[in-house]
Amino acid sequence: MTQTTGTATQHTIETCNAATSTVTLALEMGLYPTEVLYGAAYIFIDRAFVLLDKDEGQGRIGRWLVHLRGKTPLDDQQLRALSGEFGNELLSQALRRKIVKQNQKLIEEITTQAIAGAAGGTLPTDFLATDDDGMDFLDDPLGIAVPWEEKFKKKKDEPAPEAKP
Amino acid sequence: MPDAAQPSQTVLLHRALYMQQAIKEAAETFADFASFAITRQGPHYAVAIADIDAEADGDVVAEFCNFALFNTMQKKRRKVQAVA
């Protein structure tokens, strides 16, 4: 059993089998929320078969179990590299989540301003009808929905315009 | 991790990590290659996979697991976005 320990992370290789190209990692549940686990699994889903499980742990803190199997045959070294990459991705996802949480308000504010700018300074509150003009959505006072042919149709008794020389 | 060589297998997907609807949708996706029966077994969903098409390209069971996981992630993300 190999143990990889970082400053803020800990993941353990539970099993590593080159014959079946599988590696199983155990992660402390307290360190990795499910969103982080999902985020890392999503990155690996195109390279490996990923199966997540939970070891409830009797009398100790529960663990996430991550079973990875390479889509192509992998040797022992490659499997260990794969598990290391997964550990790195976990860290990356955890950091990303922390940054998003810290800057949530700022991100929302910038997004709102960007949307308001794209809409020509119109805010969502501008769309709230304050007075009813009594018109239906099918009403067409400017005749926009009238086809061109109908609008400019020649009348029968109207003389044709003279041709210019 | 499921073994590709078996003609029928049972996969245990933990209920804390996989959504039933997501598993059902994955089963529908792979319905042409195997038959699926989903039951509850303790903290897991037990998915009995039988009649696996031997001529199917790739590992049907493992691909099914990936699809179930991906569907779950998508559904959970949509749920979070809907709440926000």
Image (spheres, rainbow, N blue to C red):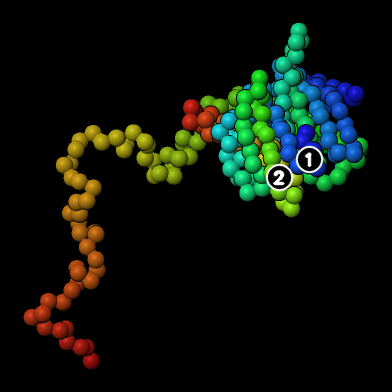
- SS at mark 2? loop
**Which sits earlier in the primary sequence, circle 2 or circle 1?**
1
Mark 1 surroundings: few (<14), some (14-19) or many (≥20) residues within 10 A: few
Mark 2 and mark 1 residues within 8 Å of each other at the beta carbon: yes
Question: In the orientation shown, which residue stands out farthest toward the left?
Answer: A157
Residue bearing mark 2: B52
For disc 1, the chain is B
B64 over A164 or under it: above or below: above
Of residues B57 and A13, which is closer to you in this image? B57
Residue B61 horizontal/vertical position (percent): 72, 40
In this picture, residue A101 sits left or right of residue A123: right
Residue B9 horizontal/vertical position (percent): 73, 36
Mark 2 surroundings: few (<14), some (14-19) or many (≥20) residues within 10 A: many
Q: Residue at x 23, y 71 (%)?
A: A149
- Residue B73, image quadrant: top right
Residue A16 horizontal/vertical position (percent): 88, 31
Q: Which mark is residue B6?
A: 1
